[in-house]
Structure formats: structure tokens, C-alpha cells
Amino acid sequence: MPNKWTAADIPDQHGRTAVVTGANSGIGFVAARELTRAGARVVLAVRNAQKGAEAASTIQTAVPSAEIEVGSLDLSSLASVRGFAEWVAREHEGLDLLINNAGVMAASPRQKTADGFELQFGTNHLGHFALTGLLLDRMAGRDDARVVTVSSGAHRMGRIKFDDLQSERSYGRWRAYGQSKLSNLLFAFELDRRLRAAGSTVRSLAAHPGYAATNLQFAAAPRLDRMVMAVGNRLMAQSAEMGALPLLYAATYPGLEGGTYVGPDSFFEQRGHPKPVGTSPAARGEEAARRLWAMSEELTGLQFRITSDTSA
Ligand SMILES: NC(=O)c1ccc[n+]([C@@H]2O[C@H](COP(=O)([O-])OP(=O)(O)OC[C@H]3O[C@@H](n4cnc5c(N)ncnc54)[C@H](OP(=O)(O)O)[C@@H]3O)[C@@H](O)[C@H]2O)c1
């Protein structure tokens, strides 16, 4: 393993197709740009067409050879997730990388998605759960296909409130974020177990960026939180360029096992270069993962079809 892995170490990605959610901003934008630089054809999956077009144009300027497309995806609407997955299926014969990156943090007051889910659980977890279920068939049988789900150090403060998943009885903006990020990990590891059990060659991994200065800190949080985080961003955060490295490592490092979680290597995983890292014990809980999976299928109305690649 190289000592300090950077985007320059991404193996050749020519011939590979990637979908990156939330690719117009922050670490998703950097990940999309670096994947195109390595030769991948990248779909920027974004909810705002204008922001998507601007991001595509910036990438095209930085990487003139970039093969890039913009697709419309609002993870807070299951209809939009279905529409996007159908579009990908029509436009692309297969998919090699799915990077479940988009996210919203600390929304206040409590908000709901188009389908009535609490915004953070609905967007960060259920939207990506449904998206993955709908795109998995496109990944079957591809060489080194990977799903990378982006979590956070905040998963450590997360609890899955099985009796109040939508925080209807009691809402805390950070508790809801923690629950959504713990859900991301439970999902990623349960998907890995199910893929292995089915004999699939698709791998499911997870990553977190540490603390990176992006729009996340300003998109949905209340004013006081934003002010505190603005100071934190200046004093403690690393760049989005560095924050994207764990995603890119999880997506491309040769031979990485399914179920691996990648984060930064320094200062309590807040900054640095990527390496495999640990999780809270709760994130590896298999019973909770199965229960969350069943409830997520029920809520999204989507049954995963996980098969061995040969019979997919
Ligand atoms: N930055 C950090 O320190 C940090 C730490 C731990 C984990 N993370 C995780 O890293 C991921 C990326 O965050 P970031 O820091 O790069 O933040 P960011 O700059 O705010 O990017 C978030 C992206 O998600 C998109 N998004 C939000 N809601 C969406 C929806 N309903 N449908 C589709 N896209 C949606 C945003 O689109 P718009 O531009 O249209 O809003 C944006 O493109 C998140 O999952 C976050 O939880 C970040």
C-alpha cells in the first residue's frame, strides 16, 4: 500500500462508468472530477440542473478529455429516484461504480421528503437505499463493480430509533443526522453480506471524508450552528480535495474487500490521507442491519433482487 495515497494513484478507469450522487458540490464534485481524470465516464447525479451544468463545465475545463453527463436525481423523492434509475438503464449498458455521496445535515426545524420521510433519514439513507436497489442489476457481472456509500464520523453518535425512525415523536437535528449516517453504514455492510451470500462479484464498501470544508455545514443547519461551523471550517477542516480521497480510495484501490470502511488517517480521522478505518460496534450489528433493511424495503416499496452475477 502506498504510504500517502492521493488522487494521482487512482488506477486507469477508461471503459468504466460511474454515477456520483451530489456531484455538483463538495467532495462529490472532487470525486467526479478525479474519476473523469482517470478516464471514467461519469454521471453527475444532481437535483439542480443548473448547478449540474456548471459543475460539468468546470470539470470539462479542468479535464478537457472528460466524458461527463448530468442526470436529474432528487433523493428526497422516490419518484425522482425511480426516474433517474430508468434513465441510467436506458442510456448506459452497465454501471461499474455507484457512489452514494449526496447528503444533508442538521436540518432545522424537522422537514419531510416528498414521500413524508424525515428529511435526513429519507435523503441520506432511504433515497440511496432505493437508488442502489434499482441500479444493482446494471452492475452485475461487471469487472470490479463497487457501491461506495458515504457515511460520517457522526455515525458514532447515531442510534436507530426503530420505534420512531422518522423522528415524529421527538426530533433532534444532530440525532437525526447521526441516525442517517449510522443507517448508511448498516446498509453498506448488510449489502456486502447479501452480495457475498448470493455469490455476486459486486462489492459494497463505505467511506467518510473526515472533516472537510464544503457546503454541507451551511445548507440546512440553523444560523447558530452555521456560525459555529464556519469557525470550525477555518480552524480545523481539511479541503474538499482531501475529503474526497477516502471515497476515491474505496472506489478504486485494487483488491479492496467488500465491507471495508475508509477514512482519513490523521487527527482522530478528521484529516489526512485515506486508509481502512474502524466503526462503532453498532455499525457492524447484523440484527439491526437486517431489521433496518426490512423496514427500508417496506418504506420504499422496493424489494432488492440480489443474485449471483451469472444468473442476473
Ligand atoms: N464535509 C464534511 O465534513 C463531511 C463529514 C462527514 C460526512 N460527510 C458526508 O459527505 C457527503 C457529501 O457532503 P459534502 O460535505 O460534500 O457536502 P455538500 O458540499 O453540501 O454536498 C452535498 C451534495 O448533496 C446534494 N444533495 C443534498 N440533498 C439532495 C437531494 N435531496 N437529492 C440529491 N442531491 C442532494 C447537494 O446538492 P445541492 O447542491 O443541490 O444542495 C450537494 O451536491 C454527505 O453524505 C455528508 O454527510 C461530509
Image: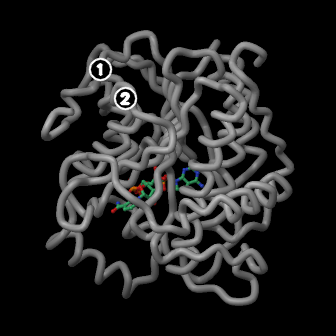
* Residue drawn where x is 68% and y is 55% of the image: 126
Which residue is found at the position 38% from the left and 69% from the top?
Answer: 218
Q: Which residue is mark 1?
A: 11
- Circles 2 and 1: CB atoms closer than 8 Å: yes
How far from the left and from the top, in percent, is residue 177?
Answer: 53, 72
Q: Is residue 60 above or below residue 217?
A: above
- Tell me, for residue 77, which label it has, or none: none
Q: Residue at x 74, y 67 (%)?
A: 117
Q: Is residue 124 among what the camera can see? A: no
**Quarter for ligand 1?**
bottom left
Q: Is residue 19 above or below residue 28?
A: above
In this rendered view, identify the residue nearer to me: 86 or 133.
133
Q: Position of residue 310 (x, y in %)?
A: 72, 13
Determine if the C-beta at disc 1 is less than 8 A from ligand 1: no
Q: What residue lies at 54% left-to-right and 32% top-to-bottom?
A: 203
- Please give left or right for residue 264 compared with residue 186 in the image: left
Q: Residues within 10 Å of mark 1 (few under 14, many from 20)?
A: some
| Residue 158 visible, this orientation | yes
- In the rendered structure, which amino acid carries the disc numbered 1? Pro
Ranked by sequence position, the earlier of labels 2 and 1 is 1
Q: Quadrant of the N terminus?
A: top left
Circle 2 packing at 10 Å, graded few (<14), some (14-19), many (20+), is many
- Determine the secondary structure under disc 1: loop
Residue 301 lies left or right of residue 15; in this view the side is right
Numbered disc 2: secondary structure? helix
The spot of residue 72 in percent (x, y) is 61, 37
Disc 2 residue type? Thr
Specify the quadrant of the image occupied by residue 308: top right
In the image: residue 275, left or right of residue 153: left
Identify residue for label 2: 252
